[in-house]
Amino acid sequence: MLFKRKKKLSQFEKLKNFLFPPKGIIRGYKYILKRLFRLNGSPHSIALGAAFGIAIAMTPFFGLQLILTFIFDFIFKANITASLISSIIGNPLTFPFIWISGYQLGNFILSNENIDNTSFLTSIEQIKEAFQTSNWNLIENSALAILTPMTIGGLLLGFIFGIITYIFTIKAIKKYKLQKQEKLKAKVIKK
């Protein structure tokens, strides 16, 4: 093999490298941003796609997020690749933070006063036990008690972060493309 390691990594080393990459986590995100800036398309289309990817990643619709992203990209003619790249923000490391913050924000909006993280975790445990015993009434009641505030909070978070992402991305892409054009002009002038 061309890119095979000379010394195989142990399972512990593989796990350590996965959790703490040797070159750092920030390097991966910088690479993702560069891929986003280098996409073909108008800055508006790319920024809109990135905004949809981030916004939908904030919702609790796990499993439907990619489908929703494709639907919004198709309707608004946004860049699908930008949506997929930016939806990486919703991953197993960030989902607990996204869902708990959406749950708390949703409860704040719904004026549920005595709700905290322990009640969220308790409801998750109740749903788990209900699935094990096939108690569908308890599943429905517990799921609605969690999903209603999570959906409301997640939609609001998605809207806020989507707008922030759109503004940041469109400015950054315009700047990047302008710098790229200036470099090409400088090369042509040198010849």
Image (cartoon, rainbow, N blue to C red):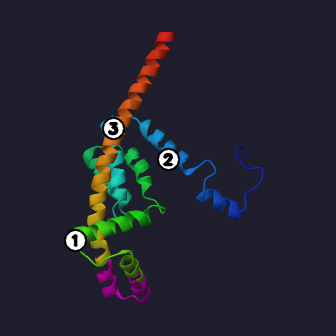
Does residue 91 lie above or below 4 as drawn? below
| Residue that protrudes farthest toward the right in the picture | 6
Q: Give the range drawn in magenta.
A: 126-144
- The residue pinned by badge 3 equals 170
Name which of mark 2 and mark 3 comes first in the sequence: 2
* Residue 171 seen in render: yes
Residue 29 at what x, y percent from top left? 49, 47
Q: Look at the numbered disc 2 and give the secondary structure of its residue.
A: helix
**What is the number of the mark on residue 110?**
1
- The residue pinned by badge 2 equals 29
Name which of mark 1 and mark 3 comes first in the sequence: 1
| Residue that protrudes farthest toward the front in the picture | 113
Q: What secondary structure is the stretch in magenta mostly built from?
A: helix
Residue 106 at what x, y percent from top left? 27, 68
Q: Which amino acid does label 1 sit on?
A: Leu
Write the residue at 42% across / 90% down. Answer: 133
The crowd level at tag 2 (other Cα within 10 Å; few <14, some 14-19, many 20+) is few
Write the residue at 37% across / 76% down. Answer: 120
